[in-house]
Image: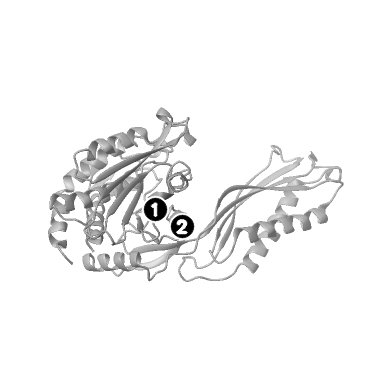
Amino acid sequence: MKNYKDVCSEVESLKEAMVDTLAEMVKIPAISPSYGYEGEYDKAEKLLEIIKDWPFDKVERYDAPDERAKNGIRPNILAYYYGEDEKAPRLWILSHLDVVPPGDLAKWTVTEPFKPLVKDGKIYGRGSEDNGQSIVSSLYAMKALMNLSIRPKGSVILAFVSDEETGSEKGLKWLMENHPELFKKDDLVIVPDGGNSDGSFIEVAEKSILWLKVKVQGKQVHASMPQKGLNAHRVALEFAYNFDKLLHEKYNRQNALFDPPVSTFEPTMASNPADSPNIVPGEHELVFDCRILPEYKIEQILSDAQKTAEEIKKKFQKGDLPEIHFEILQRLDAPLPTDPNSQIVKSLQKALSDLRENEPKVGGIGGGTFAAHFRELGIPAVVWATLDEMAHQPNEYAKISNIVEDAKVIATLALN
């Protein structure tokens, strides 16, 4: 492995600069307009300012229109560092600029969300781990190569995109739909937006996600005269029981890539407008959170929901009631997994094995990342980083050692 010791030493020398850069990024609340904020404009400007004198071969900015955001745009930045071999696959390192809202400020006990604090080997602040840590790791992996005048084997593209936290409609998905020429089938992709505390987990597969709201309409009456109405709560309970039972019996296949290795179907929310013990509710809503193995299709689940609803309606029928309707709150159809024997997986495993003592493991997750969008295009993508999994939590932090060590892995991967 050429020059890797010199590169790792150079990465170490950049530790202070990494800390300073992440602190500057954390100060900027790049939160989606969907949450009532301005978006990523200021953070993108800061990033461009930081790298303006770095010898990237090309830096491009693609602004997705969004009238809700500052200056009406959601910026996406691509920074290219060309490789020695024009025929070698390009390596994408894909991070996101946006962060989630701070949540309950009273729970931030170490520092305020956007006042970064360095303490005990950690940088505290909203977005420090998700996804600031990986923004900085990828940047300074390339800075180490640049400082040593070393070119990667194939070209490296650092992508810093908007809107990951609220669906990527103005970020990666927008880029793929409006600029498909940017992507090639032989590209290799790392999304450093998930992982575990020792950096040994490489995610190659995701479950499909379906958040399904069930709305039941009955007839509200006084609880002492239930025969005059139709209890929407009871209808909803019956539906939930039968639908839940059907899902677990029918979709029971196991896939060892995942933990847990099965599809999960969890009733999570329930509500109705009855605000007194003596009211039979005429409306009731409940939500199922479904994480479905990629072997199954979401359309099958929706079809079974409709069939179950028809059966329940017949059982409780009073005139035109009950009515049962569905609303899809979120849907992500998982593409086929990245092949565990693909080049990106094998190359990352080798880099981790060379630099760390732990043995990397390959698997799948129940959540969704924008690696799925690459997989939909047939481009192999992995999700990997070394994280304490503090994302979206009060007192979020990034370990400084994780930033540095991940930069070494990215630089080593680029070399080989």
- Density class for disc 2 (Cα within 10 Å; few <14, some 14-19, many ≥20) is few
Residue 50 in picture, x, y percent from top left: 23, 38
The quadrant where residue 75 appears: top left
- Outermost residue, top direction? 71
Q: Secondary structure at mark 1?
A: loop
Query: Can you give x and y, in whole percent of width and height, for residue 148 in the image?
Result: 12, 53
Mark 1 residue crowding within 10 angstroms, few (<14) / some (14–19) / many (20+): some
Of 145 and 259, which appears nearest the observer?
A: 145
Location of mark 1 (residue) = 183
**CB-based contact (under 8 Å), mark 2 and mark 1:** yes
Measuring 54% from the left and 56% from the top, which residue is drawn there?
333
Query: Viewed as shown, does residue 160 lie left or right of 329?
Result: left
Task: Tell me residue 202's x, y (percent).
Answer: 36, 63
Judge left or right: residue 390 versus residue 356: right
Q: How many marks?
A: 2
Q: Nearer the viewer, residue 380 or 337?
A: 380
**Residue 201 in picture, x, y percent from top left:** 35, 63
Residue linked to disc 2: 377
Q: Report the quarter where the N terminus lies.
A: bottom left
Decide: is 377 above or below 250. above
> Which dot marks residue 174?
none
Q: Earlier in the sequence, mark 2 or mark 1?
A: 1
Q: CA distance from mark 2 to mark 1?
A: 9 Å
Query: Would you place residue 273 above or below residue 269 in this image?
Result: above
Identity, as a three-letter code, of the amino acid under mark 1: Phe
- Residue at image position (55%, 67%) is 295
In-front residue for pair 53/117:
53
Please say whether residue 281 is visible from this viewpoint.
no
Amino acid residing under circle 2: Leu
> Which quadrant is home to the C terminus?
bottom left
Nearest the viewer among 296 and 379 is: 379
